[in-house]
Structures are given as structure tokens and as C-alpha cells.
Image (cartoon, rainbow, N blue to C red):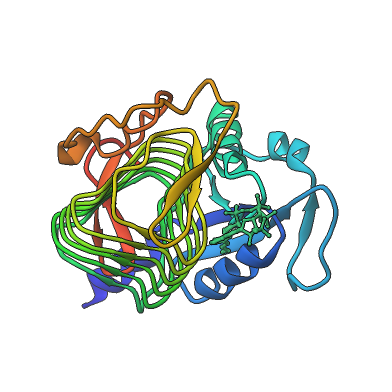
Amino acid sequence: MKRKIKARAKQKKVFLILMGGGGHARVLKDILQNEPGVQLLGYTDLKPNSLIGFRYLGDDGVLGNFVKKDVRLVNAVGSVRLPEVRRKIFEKGKALGFQFHSVIHPRATIASDVFSGEGAQVMASAVINPGAHIAENALINTGAMVDHDCQIGAHTHVAPGVTMSGNVFIGFGCHIGAGATIIHGISIGSETLIGAGSVVIKDIPGGVTAYGVPAVVVAEKNSSRGSSSVTRRRLSASKVGETSPKSKGFGGLITGHKVTFLQGKP
Ligand SMILES: CC(C)(COP(=O)(O)OP(=O)(O)OC[C@H]1O[C@@H](n2cnc3c(N)ncnc32)[C@H](O)[C@@H]1OP(=O)(O)O)[C@@H](O)C(=O)NCCC(=O)NCCS
């Protein structure tokens, strides 16, 4: 018993900085302030937000003042007009040498074999069923349902209330709008935006905006990154971070409300 207490006392605290000070930052703060072994240092953004209720550190430039091995970052950008902002924040933090902390709400329901990449986030009441892979920096937002064997690409935001049947493949950097429904076996290419409330019953290529019931492509984005065809490939557990060209994240098993990393240290 004594040894256990000693070991716990020795356990290093994880210091966290949130990148972004909007609505999603408030949700993350609410989760992280109750996570054992974690201490929030503050948040970065272009300007302070009085609603956040904890320390404003300055813009991202201040990150250079912190020791990388002592501090992890949390991507606090949820929904913004341009879905690539989430990816850019992640890439900026990685380029500075930081690791991203994964945030898993204690009341998310996640099957025991679900793998996730570095910095993945799963919010309250989300359900992720067996065989699903959540790549690095992906966000499964409040109440979203990700059924068995789905693959969610790096940096993709699955907005609140999305329903995804089994074996759906989503590329990297997508935004799946609030309340959208995607039927089983559908593939959606990278950097595609699916409008809120859409019902997707056919594959959608990369780099487009699609919406409606049933969803149809309404616009092509000027993107050199979103491929127009859908490449569907099953990832091995340890390669779950590799759905983005720049991704080299760790694959990890979600256990309880934490991600247990398989390779290296988070
Ligand atoms: C798809 C989307 C990006 C389109 O945005 P936009 O380009 O600014 O489009 P607009 O608002 O100018 O609307 C253009 C037309 O598309 C229609 N439209 C827009 N979004 C639609 C949707 N999700 N489903 C059906 N029709 C839609 C509008 O009614 C409008 O039709 P009209 O020309 O006949 O009047 C946006 O509406 C959307 O659904 N975003 C997702 C938001 C979300 O899920 N946020 C999650 C927060 S966590």
C-alpha cells in the first residue's frame, strides 16, 4: 500500500496548454480540470476571451518559452469556417517539438479495441464501437456515433450528433457537419465538408462541399491537398495516425478516459 502511494506521489504531473480560446476550449477545460495528474497552465490565442475563466498566456509565440518535455499541447479549435485550421494548429505545435495530449470525456462510450492517434479528442456521450480507428488530432464531438470498423482520418472533425453506421471511411481534414447521417460502408475523401443534417448515401470525393438529403456535391474546393478520388485503405493499429500525408503519430488504445500509447511516449 505504502509503495503504491509513493509511486503515485512520484508520478509526474502533465502540464497542458490549450491552443485556442473559443467555445471548444471551454468544453476541454471542463473535462481537463477533473482529469487526475493534469494541470492546465493556460491558453494561447490572438486575444484573451473573458468567458474562458483561466489564464491567457498570449499568442502562439509564447510556446517557445516552455520546455517541450514538460508541457503538452491541446488543440482547442473546434468549429471554425475553415476546417484546415485544426490541422494547421496541430502541425504548428508538432513543428515546435511538442506532443499533443488526447482528451477523452469520462462519459464517452468507447469499445475496448478502439485505437486513436496522438491528440485525438472524444467528447461527452460520443459512442465509438469496436474496430474503429480515430487518427491523430481527430475530434469526435458531443453525442456523435461512430459505429464498428469506421476509420476517421487525421484532423477530421465529426461534429455533434453525427450518426455514422458501420465501416464508414472518412479521409483526413474533413468536417462532418452537425447531425449528419452517413450510411454503412460509405467513403468520404480527404478535406471534404459535409453540411449539417445531410444524409450521405453515396461515396463523396475529396476536396468538395456536399450537403442535402441525400447529400450531393455542391462545390469543389480550391485545394491541392484534397484528392478527388476516394482512397480507402485499412490501417493497422500502429499506423492509425497515418491518414494524413504529414502524420507520424503514435497509435494508442483508448482505455478509460486516457489513451495508452503503443509506441514511444505521448
Ligand atoms: C454546408 C455549409 C458549409 C454551407 O455553408 P455556406 O457555403 O456558407 O452556404 P450558405 O449558408 O451560403 O447557403 C447556401 C445555400 O445552401 C443551403 N444550405 C447550406 N447548408 C445546408 C445544409 N447543411 N443542408 C441543406 N442546405 C444547405 C442554404 O439553404 C442556401 O440555399 P439557397 O441558396 O437556396 O438559399 C454549412 O451550411 C454547413 O452545414 N456547415 C456545417 C456547420 C456545422 O456542422 N457546424 C458544427 C459546429 S460544432
Residue 246 in the image: above or below residue 26: above
Q: Give how far across and how far down residue 206 sits, in percent.
A: 42, 33
Q: Give how far across and how far down residue 242 sits, in percent.
A: 31, 31
230 horizontally vs 185: left or right: right
Residue 33 in the image: above or below residue 182: below
Between 156 and 248, the residue placed more toward the observer is: 156
Residue 2 in the image: above or below residue 68: below
203 horizontally vs 83: left or right: left
Q: Quadrant of residue 85?
A: top right
Q: Residue furthest top?
A: 224
Between 161 and 209, the residue placed more toward the observer is: 209
Q: How many marks?
A: 0
Between 37 and 77, the residue placed more toward the observer is: 77
Residue at (61, 62) in percent of width and height = 40
Residue at (83, 70) in percent of width and height = 50
Residue at (64, 70) in percent of width and height = 26
Which image quarter is the N terminus in?
bottom left
Which image quarter is the C terminus in?
top left
Q: Give how far across and how far down residue 44 sits, in percent.
A: 73, 50
Between 111 and 142, the residue placed more toward the observer is: 142
Q: Quadrant of residue 237?
A: top left
Q: Quadrant of ligand 1?
A: bottom right
Q: Quadrant of residue 263?
A: top left
243 horizontally vs 32: left or right: left
Q: Give how far across and how far down residue 150 sits, in percent.
A: 22, 52
Residue at (73, 40) in percent of width and height = 60
